[in-house]
Amino acid sequence: MSKIVVIGAGIAGLTATLRCVAAGHQVTTITKGIGGLQLGQGTMDILGYMPNRVERPLDDLAALADEHPDHPYAILNADAVRTGVNYFAELVGEDLLVGDPERNVFLPTAVGALRPTALAQPSMMAGQLSDGDSVVMVGIRQLKDFYPGLAAQNLARSTLPDGGRAAVRATYIDLPARKGEADATALTYARVMDDPTFRQLFVTAVKKVIEPGEKVGLPAMLGLKDPNSWREVAEGLGTEVFEVPLQPPSVPGMRLNQTLVDKVKNARVRWVYGSQVLGGVAENGRLTGVVAGTTGHNVTFPADAVIHAPGGFESGALELDSYNHVFERTFDLPLAGADNEELLHGNYWGEEQPLFRVGVRVDEQMRPVDADGSAVYENLHAAGGIIANANRWREKSGDGIAVASAVRAADSLSTPTTAAASGAMDSKGDN
Amino acid sequence: MRRIETDVVVIGGGATGAGVVRDVAMRGYRAVLVDRADLGQGTTGRYHGLLHSGGRYVVSDARSATECAEENVIVTNIHADAVERTGGLFILPPEDPQDFGDKWWQGAKDTKVPAEEISIAEALKREPRINPHITRAFAVEDGAVDGWQMVWGAANSAKLYGAEILTYHRVAKIIREEDQVRAVMCTDEKTGEDVQIDCTFVINAAGAWAGEIAAMADCHDVTVVPGRGIMIAMNHRLVNSVVNRCIYPADGDILVPVHTVSIIGTTDVKADDPDKLTIPRDEVQQMMDAGEVLVPGFRKARAVHAWAGARPLVKDGRVSAEDTRHMSRGMSVLDHADRDGLKGLLTISGGKLTTYRLMAEHVVDQMCEQLGDERPCRTAEEAVPKSEEGKNYVVTHRLEEREEDRLADQIICECELMSRQSYVDLLEAQPQATLDDLRRQLRLGMGPCQGGFCTTRAAGLALEHENIDIERATGLLRLFLKNRWIGLWPILYGDQVRQTALDNWIFQGTLDVEHLPTPDEELTV
């Protein structure tokens, strides 16, 4: 049994943590705060655009790798992605993610774009529209993050994946989540939707504004803890419903996050929350521990191996200072793309800003490497958004990269034990 | 073609033009103001927000100093809702010429700019974050003024006196009948319609664009040199009063608390084209270094936005055309009757936002003289609408309002505490507005998230509340994001990068905005 420290509790950190536990390691997960899952759309993206719309993401990874040999998917390949995605889907279960990693689905966003993703929450799947569908997008007056008109009218003028069009209209209901409150977030609604009494009020209100035969698009707030909340709404309305993810706080993202964090805690992982890792302790090219800042003093956590999954610029793991210098905050790792003279350009709708491709380069075992391609530390592995050369948000590739790299990192840990006797990975514990 | 008849056409909807149209209307003339864009979209909206006490000019430009001191009092009264009485300090850092302190003090006395020398301890008590090594400190009556609020105040006052304000009307031609101005031809930029405004007088208050306008009346060689200055807004108030570096006017010598942010300014570099102002990296670095002198640790603070404005400096043969800082900042009026033999056209240029009212008074006096009318100026005595009670702006006012309506209304822009009702009301008043037009009056999207959370809401509400189609609503969203980025990328570092990554995550990641149906042609107005 090796001591593994995982840094970060986003999709990559949580996946890596559970994979290491399953392999029988003793895991400490250190996180500065709640991970990024609750900021995203709550589905599993593999690859959505390259830059044209992708239908079969795993099939297209080879072409992507040919075109961009430095892309994380070029190092990971389709098998690793399939393994990672299937592992993640198993972890969260069919109540939270369904679909086929081989094939993308196209789901409406809150502004009415058709967004490709691989797996999605079952509550969203009816959002796959076909030619001739009748759809009504229903907003709630007291929820300011969903404007059904914007979503409906853009959807109505979009060509569907089957080449057809849907008839989409918009309407509103008036139903405060809490009495007398005009301004509520989706999270407030999701919490009250877990209560059957409120759910009934909601169904009654929506029923009044929909027509027979219409599919119903709703803001993603149909319950937080109760996985059947949305099914009851669909049954109550007697039609298909689909949730549309909103800007943060993201209820679908929170569902995934909560499920994984519960699993981590139940797996007796040492969970260090609210502490930032400040650096590592190294000896002969290996990390022997990491140092985390806690109130009053710093604490060193011993480690046989470290999985570094802190995210990218969005979490502050990567930083650009006022002198235009990019650095990795925890271990000062070498960064690919950081010396680009033009990290940013002025055309918002133009090419991806090069800054957001900056990150660490990794080897097959997901170890950050220097310019010569040698591992910076023999037992430091990286996962998720800190890895260089992906356009995660534009490509819709962040989730796939995260889970594939997390699983690959966990499966190829360089610990003193594995260094001595390879094959230790066969003794995977049951999760 | 639409046809309007009036007495006076004012060209330019900046502070000067708004001041002029108000003055003209208050003296009993029929007046129309035209601008090619929104009010305050040019230089007026692209400055640091300082209502000068005059202290900045006590050594370099005595006349400007005295004018500023006098106008400061007037503007504070007549535009109470646009002015925050922050007070200001002139601080002398140890590395600057120490003898300037005495020169400054003498200058303040000579120019009658109210000032008081205070102890370093007192200065640090008032502004704990300023450089503790300063050697002298003087307190002055600087304030912060919201240029857009001020311009709209003047415009609304003019409207009460019958003036018409036509934004997004681009002047195409000034029609003359021999030696007399007869009409101004415009194009309505929103509808494409031609508009002819028959008049007997035109006042050209087009600022950095005044040369172009004069040329439309065949008055050539009016050279206005655009002096580009950049400003950077930091995400909170590093100081609560204006902090000036006590040196001869130079770059990066002022830090102004305006609304929820503080703004450092500015540089001064000759520009070729006032429509193409850049924000060069080296000037950003220069502002950062200057900020460190005033407030140590300035670089660690978060910059949220930058912009560049074009000072309209009238070319003066006495100084080299490259040296814009030392041209006259005073106002100058060109009488085209004398200069070009054309009656009914005056060009007003130069000056400062603080003295906008006085500039208007001067040019309208001159117009009255040419017309042989005796009508005195009254703009200093009467407050503009919403400022009648004389209650000056305080930074906490929106917090107070939201506490009142927190259960009944929604907050559409959390950073700036902008309510849904205030947004919908303004949409109704200006149904053809872009989100930037609304922003200038409501501060939509101007806080730390730079539109990350409010842009979709604003576009969604615009679609629901106004008679616009989905293409325009989507275009408004696209245009707003594009425009926010113009002021973001030149100063992007530190926590604002993190914010931008989150915003990209929202717009590209979650909403997939870049794959919405795109228009053949991007919306521009």
Image: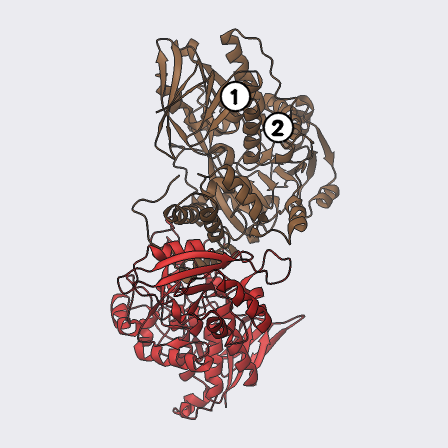
Chain colours: A red, B brown
Looking at this view, is B369 or A224 the one in front?
A224
Chain at tag 1: B
Residue drawn at the location 43% of the way across and 68% of the way down:
A241
Q: Which residue carries the number 2 mark?
A: B384
Residue B392 sits above or below residue A149 on the image: above
Callout 2, which amino acid? Val
Looking at this view, is A173 or A382 the one in front?
A173
Q: How crowded is mark 2: few (under 14 residues within 10 Å), some or many (20 or more)?
A: many
Residue A357 sits above or below residue B24 on the image: below
Is label 1 in a helix, a strand or a loop? strand
Q: Where is residue A173 in the image (x, y as percent from the top left)?
A: 52, 58
Q: Where is residue B207 in the image (x, y as percent from the top left)?
A: 46, 26
Q: Is residue B291 left or right of residue A244?
A: right
Q: Position of residue A195 (x, y in %)?
A: 59, 72
Is label 2 in a helix, a strand or a loop? loop
Q: Can residue A316 be seen in this view?
A: no
Label number found at residue B331: 1
Q: Distance between the residues labelled 2 and 1?
A: 23 Å
Q: How crowded is mark 1: few (under 14 residues within 10 Å), some or many (20 or more)?
A: many
User: Where on the picture, by quarter, is residue B111?
Assistant: top right
Chain at tag 2: B
Q: In this view, does B472 lie to the left or right of A252?
A: left
Callout 1, which amino acid? Met
Q: Is residue A314 visible?
A: yes
Q: Do labels 2 and 1 share a chain?
A: yes
Q: Residue furthest top?
A: B372
Residue drawn at the location 42% of the way across and 79% of the way down:
A89
Quadrant where the N terminus of chain B sits is: top left
Residue B38 sits above or below residue B329 on the image: below
Q: Which of marks 2 and 1 is nearer the N terminus?
A: 1
Looking at this view, is A262 or A317 the one in front?
A262
Q: Position of residue B432 (x, y in %)?
A: 44, 38
